[in-house]
Amino acid sequence: MPSRRTVLAATAGVAASLALSGTAHANDKQLRSLISRMTLEEKVGQLFVMRVYGHSATAPDQADIDANLKEIGVRTAAEMIARYRVGGIIYFTWAHNTRDPHQIADLSNGIQQASLRQPRGLPVLVSTDQEHGIVCRVGEPATLFPGAMAIGAGGARKDARTLGRIAGQELRAIGIRQNYSPVADVNVNPANPVIGVRSFGSEAGAVAGLVAAEVAGYQGAGVAATAKHFPGHGDTAVDSHYGFPVITHSRELWEKLDAVPFRAAIRAGIDSIMTAHIQFPALDASGDPATLSHPILTGILRGELGYDGVVVTDSLGMEGVRTKYGDDRVPVLALKAGVDQLLNPPSLDIAWNAVLKAVQDGELTEARLDESILRILRLKARLGLFEEPYVSHGGVTRTVGTPAHLAEADRIAERTTTLLVNEKRLLPLNRRTHRKLLVVGADPASPSGTTGPPTGVLATALTELGFTATALPTGTAPSAATVAQAVAAAQDAEAVIVGTYNITAAQKTLVEQLVATGRPVVAVAIRNPYDVAQLPAVPAYLAAYSWTDVELRAAARVIAGKAAPRGRLPVPVQRADDPAKVLYPVGYGLSYGR
């Protein structure tokens, strides 16, 4: 790894001149000078944030080399940087970028070295989706926190700020300087297939306060936060990864609901905002997705909301943005709409050349590219990338997954578990009368880097708390034979814990037959809290909001009486037989004192 002196020399003294005050616009003159010396091809590259396979920038595994050749036409991250001069790289678990913190740090350093060695080389803005809860790319031994809806149930802005601060410190230590979090969508649709528990809740004001607090935490730690998905993805019944959602809110409702957290994020000084691949006719009647909408991104976000930070698209590989236009048109139209960063196109070669050709043909001006590049370089300067592009193993060891950070995550999680049903005060379970436990239920694929599976984590945690717990995974769609096996196993237990996950008819049958055994049944919603409406006969029901270890351990402590249930619903739960009526309102949650 080059020394800092080498880094500064590699950028021909530009980096040294940029190491000034770090304020948003103090070094615009130097940045404009830097932009003026870039070739058109370098400018085009600076707009892209791209995936790349492999744990190393120069020596990935052969399977990752093959994947890179197939999808990008290069062997390694270093080759991609040399060919396309990309301004950003996004890390994914499935791309094998995130094995462990020290490896991630080495990958980040390798990426920076590859870019800074280029003529007029610039530092790369490395990003990822570390929302916590059900969406995480960096796993254990890094600190994993409860997800947004759990934080919403806890209701404490200081917890959201602490989450951002600690998570930001750990991301920065491994070379990730831009995090695509927090989710600023207000989840008002229980059937939302893509947001759900990734949202802080259904109340715009509460969501706004938690968004602003998390932004302050991340950015205070030197990591760019990203509010998503503008103009608001909280009332969709279609997943924009696979379809093209339409939001039917009026402009007036948008102002009162969807816009509120984004306004709060902007007031908090948010570094970047991510667009949504959704159609919002009240804001733009053209039928274009918001990502490609000039009225939404330039008219509303830039103009009416006064935002001048970085606008990044959601992944350009998602179906919602590809429905109407080809992959060659999407990046050009996004830039024309007001976007700065083009995230993860299906084919970098097609997208990169399309933008280049649009400038050469006069459809886009070079001045338009310069506007976005200036915002991107301002952000890189503000994050200290020109001064300190590299990270150290010592910094990783001192920062990532420390006992203090892990303890804080457990403390925060303990304030989120929500008790919705507790007939005859079944909970907390008494170890003298209910020592022998059976833990059954859904075992969805464990969120990145957690121990999993959920039944095993719960059983282990309960055993450590003095019970004798046995795990019997039954899946998200248990067969009749699996249900019969669980019912038989329940005969030997003194109580049954069952995890529900976006409850299905088969899961409902499982729980009902377990209740029919006469054994006490405690259900834990390990994703959406709405599950409780489907199970009126269950004597005790907890909402954990996710199946990450930290939330399951907290639920186990509540079941055992080692912690009090302190969470309150951040969303309403409607009745299953009459969705127009609310079964449990926002703010509902039982305690052991009543």
Image: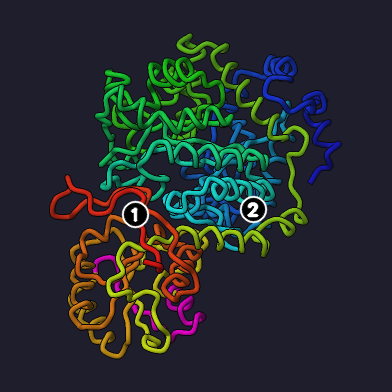
- Which is nearer the N-term, disc 2 or disc 1? 2
Q: How many marks?
A: 2
Q: Residue at x 36, y 74 (%)?
A: 427
Residue that mark 1 sits on: 588
Quarter assignment of residue 40: top right
> In the image, what residue occupies the spot 51% across and 40% down?
180
Q: Nearer the viewer, mark 2 or mark 1?
A: 1
In the image, what residue type sits under mark 1? Tyr
Which residues lie in the magenta part?
A: 457-477
Name the spot of residue 385 as percent of width and height, x first. Answer: 71, 35
Q: Quadrant of residue 142?
A: bottom right
Task: Report x, y in % for residue 215.
Answer: 56, 38
- Give 212 or 500, whichever is nearer the viewer: 212
Mark 2 lies on residue: 104
Position of residue 532 measured from the top left corner of the image (x, y, whole percent): 26, 61
Q: CA distance from mark 2 to mark 1?
A: 41 Å
Residue sitting nearer the eye, 113 or 556: 556
Q: Give the image's coloring scheme.
A: rainbow
Q: Residue furthest left?
A: 577
Using the image as rendered, state which of residue 542 and residue 406 is in the foreground.
542
Query: To which quarter of the image does residue 81 belong?
Result: top right
